[in-house]
Image (cartoon, grey):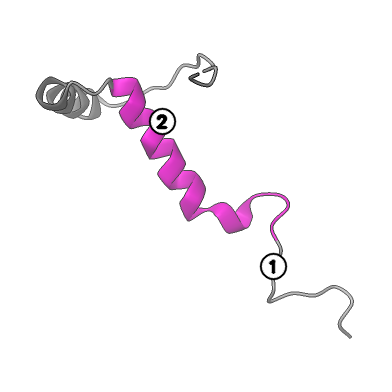
Amino acid sequence: MPRKKLSTTVYITPEQDAMLKLLHGRTKVPVAEYIRQGIDLVLEKYRAALPGQVDLAFRGDAE
């Protein structure tokens, strides 16, 4: 069963819109799916900055 999705608004440039529509036309993959994939790529790239991550370069108890 697909996971529930939340609705949100994002603002993209006309160029991004045109390229996404072109990509959709060639692949039939919904634009929203490409946007979700892009979000996943950004979250992966900045995973270390997310709460709950352990920074091994810094230990507060090491003095």
- Residue 28, above or below 60: above
Judge whether residue 43 is colored magenta.
Answer: yes
Judge whether residue 19 is colored magenta.
Answer: no
Residues tagged 2 and 1 counted as in contact (Cβ below 8 A): no
x then y, percent, for residue 1: 50, 18
Q: Which residues are magenta?
A: 31-53
The amino acid marked with disc number 2 is Arg
Name which quarter of the figure residue 6 lies in.
top right
Name which quarter of the figure residue 16 lies in.
top left
How far apart in space, not on screen, are marks 2 and 1 (Cα)? 27 Å
Q: Earlier in the sequence, mark 2 or mark 1?
A: 2
- Residue 12, above or below 45: above
Residue highlighted by disc 1: 55
In terms of depth relative to the viewer, which is nearer, 30 or 63? 30
Q: Residues within 10 Å of mark 1 (few under 14, many from 20)?
A: few
Image quarter in which the C terminus is found: bottom right
Q: Secondary structure at mark 1?
A: loop
Q: Residue at x 21, y 26 (%)?
A: 20
- Residue 41, above or below 7: below
Q: Secondary structure at mark 2?
A: helix
In terms of depth relative to the viewer, which is nearer, 25 or 46? 25
Residue highlighted by disc 2: 36
Q: Residue at x 52, y 18 (%)?
A: 5
The amino acid marked with disc number 1 is Asp
Farthest front residue in view: 1
Q: Main secondary structure of the magenta part?
A: helix
x then y, percent, for residue 38: 37, 38
In terms of depth relative to the viewer, which is nearer, 25 or 63? 25
Q: Residue at x 42, y 22 (%)?
A: 10
Farthest top residue in view: 7
x then y, percent, for residue 61: 89, 76
**Relative horizontal placement of residue 46, taking residue 53 as reference (left or right):** left
